[in-house]
Image: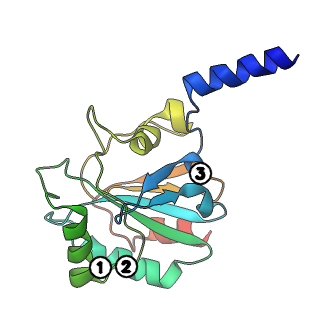
Amino acid sequence: MRSFIGLIFVFMSVVGFSQNNFHDFVVKDINGNDFAFDQLKGKKVMVVNTASKCGFTPQYKGLEKLYKEFGGDNFVILGFPANNFLRQEPGSNDEIKEFCTLNYGVSFPMMSKISVKGKDMHPLYKWLTSKELNEFKDSKVSWNFQKYLIGKEGNLEKVISPKTKPYDSEILDWIMN
């Protein structure tokens, strides 16, 4: 029996664990530190791919207002800068952090710049966009400021269009219920 358990352990070590739940991920924050999503258990989470030079960039203001009003023990917003759409996020992590702080007073957690589509898509976004992985639905990141709403148990619950503003009733209803 011990050898069987040992074989399973070796197999799992070689193959690696896949992320089946949002809370399984660990990413780098904008300062380069590990940010483990298991610390978000019991909270609703909005994941947003962001950009500093986009027509939707003013949504930072609404996101920050939403975070100030509802953020805390039950809700958090995670910003993921990405340069996938017309090179609208060309800056470094330091430049992005400075832009967000100076122009919008962003206080919600910002993560390191990643890719949200293509061959170099970050594993989190593979999970967010694949029904096979998230067990909810397939989606494509259509533009900057697309929103993914994650429930308290770490399950994807809604995909919200980039055009939808942070204070839309669909988002507010989801946060409050």
Residue 57 place in picture, x, y as percent: 21, 69
Mark 2 burial class by Cα count in 10 Å: few <14, some 14-19, many 20+: some
Which of the numbered marks, if any, corresponds to residue 64?
2
Q: Amino acid at mark 1?
A: Lys
Looking at the image, is 9 positioned above or below residue 158?
above
Q: Earlier in the sequence, mark 3 or mark 2?
A: 3
Residue depicted at 61% across the width and 62% down the height: 39
Q: Residue 61, which numbered label?
A: 1
Label 2 sits on a secondary structure element that is helix
Contact flag, marks 1 and 2 (Cβ < 8 Å) = yes
Q: CA distance from mark 1 to mark 2?
A: 5 Å
The amino acid at mark 3 is His
Which image quarter is the C terminus in?
Answer: bottom right
Residue with the most extreme right position: 1
**Which one is nearer the viewer's eye here, 127 or 147?**
127
Instruction: Report the quarter where the N terminus lies.
Output: top right
Q: Position of residue 105 (x, y in %)?
A: 30, 84
Q: Nearer the viewer, residue 66 or 22?
A: 22
Judging by the rendered image, the residue that carries numbered circle 3 is 23
Circle 3 or circle 1, nearest the eye: 3
* Residue 23: image location, x then y, percent: 59, 51
Q: How many numbered circles does the render carry?
A: 3
- The amino acid type of the residue labelled 2 equals Glu
Horizontal arrangement in the rendering, residue 2 relative to residue 124 (left or right) = right
Q: 157 left or right of 115? A: right
Label number found at residue 105: none
